[in-house]
Image: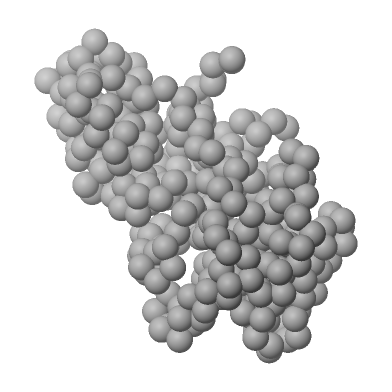
């Protein structure tokens, strides 16, 4: 099964949420806004229920209303794609009055070290393994650092992935200092000239001050071991948590500024609209999205591809 087919299938619950109002999607925008205001109210409810957020929903509906000459589906797809653009680009597109074209953010890290953070249970370790496989498939050398020294067998889990993929893994001891693991790994990466180092971290609640401070320490020791690094800090977010996950992301961003977000488990929720407020409110790009357990189920995020899959519309070739 291709990635687009997996993405379509993975978004089926969110699609069902929005498609409760699908009966009018082929109608002209002006006709719907003139004669079917009850349908607009239903659409507003469906978008909010999909966790698009109230502010974004109001903006989407206003953009749709102004899209005379289009049918509702195309106008809604354009408006959603616009919401997934970075804030500055979104403002520019709105000012100029045209819809954005296909937009896939760069997923090539700006440097060599990527810290991967998040709360317990979002799948950071597995996500790191998938990231390693993705970049190795593009000819880059990869290392892992088993910085989650608190969860029993976390290091062993990453070690198993390393063995399976042929990736070196720098490990510490259970209950040891995660900053020491990060330091050793960053030093080794610089000495070996490895292209990318992914640093696993212990899952932590965003409201635990001491644990958030520990992330800052890990970042500082990486900078000391490998000046200019970590180039990236990516947050793994479980789509099922919806707006709660967004609040987590804000707290992490305040503590350790994020450069990217990876949204997993989109196949397990009707709240796929959470991608919109992540982009709007954090101002941080979504790097990858996941719709399953296999390595191929984690792919770079493309806003137009996502929206077309959400509406089950073919993505243009070329």
In front here: 228 or 10? 228
| Relative to 228, 213 lies left or right | left
Circle count: 0
Residue shown at 69% from the left, 88% from the top: 176
Res 186 → quadrant: bottom right
Looking at the picture, does residue 269 appear above or below residue 123?
above
Q: Residue furthest top?
A: 69
Residue shown at 58% from the left, 72% from the top: 224
Residue 34 visible (yes or no)? yes
Res 228 → quadrant: bottom right
Q: Position of residue 64 (x, y in %)?
A: 23, 26
In front here: 80 or 29? 80
* Image quadrant occupied by the C terminus: top right
Q: Position of residue 135 (x, y in %)?
A: 71, 45
| Relative to 73, 145 lies left or right | right
In front here: 24 or 191? 191
Q: How is the image coloured?
A: one colour
Residue 306 visible (yes or no)? no
| Relative to 179, 135 lies left or right | right
* Image quadrant occupied by the N terminus: top right
Q: Residue furthest bottom?
A: 175
Looking at the picture, does residue 173 appear above or below residue 11?
below
Looking at the picture, does residue 59 appear above or below residue 146?
above
Residue shown at 73% from the left, 86% from the top: 174
Q: Position of residue 142 (x, y in %)?
A: 75, 54
Residue shown at 44% from the left, 68% from the top: 256
| Relative to 147, 92 lies left or right | left
Q: Position of residue 237 (x, y in %)?
A: 50, 59
């Amino acid at each position: 099964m291709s990635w687009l087919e997996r993405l379509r299938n993975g978004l089926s619950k969110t699609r069902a949420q929005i498609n409760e109002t699908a009966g009018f999607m082929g109608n002209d925008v002006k006709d719907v806004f003139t004669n079917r205001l009850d349908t607009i109210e239903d659409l507003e409810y469906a978008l909010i229920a999909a966790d698009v957020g109230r502010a974004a929903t109001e903006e989407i509906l206003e953009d749709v209303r102004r899209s005379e000459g289009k049918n509702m589906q195309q106008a809604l797809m354009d408006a959603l794609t616009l919401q997934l653009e970075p804030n500055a680009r979104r403002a520019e597109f709105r000012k100029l009055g045209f819809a954005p074209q296909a937009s896939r953010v760069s997923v090539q890290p700006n440097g060599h070290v990527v810290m991967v953070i998040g709360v317990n249970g979002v799948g950071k370790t597995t996500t790191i393994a998938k990231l390693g496989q993705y970049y190795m498939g593009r000819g880059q050398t990869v290392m892992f650092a088993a910085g989650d020294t608190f969860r029993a067998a976390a290091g062993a889990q990453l070690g198993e992935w390393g063995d399976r993929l042929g990736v070196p893994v720098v490990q510490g001891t259970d209950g040891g200092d995660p900053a020491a693991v990060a330091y050793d790994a960053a030093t080794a990466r610089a000495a070996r000239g490895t292209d990318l180092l992914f640093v696993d971290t212990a899952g932590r609640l965003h409201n635990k001050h001491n644990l958030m401070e520990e992330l800052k320490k890990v970042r500082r020791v990486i900078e000391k071991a490998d000046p200019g690094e970590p180039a990236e800090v990516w947050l793994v977010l479980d789509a099922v948590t919806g707006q709660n996950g967004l609040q987590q992301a804000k707290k992490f961003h305040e503590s350790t500024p994020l450069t990217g977000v990876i949204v997993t488990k989109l196949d397990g929720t009707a709240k796929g609209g959470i991608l919109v407020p992540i982009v709007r409110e954090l101002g941080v790009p979504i790097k990858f999205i996941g719709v399953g357990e296999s390595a191929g189920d984690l792919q770079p995020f493309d806003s137009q591809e996502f929206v077309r899959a959400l509406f089950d519309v073919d993505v243009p070739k070329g």
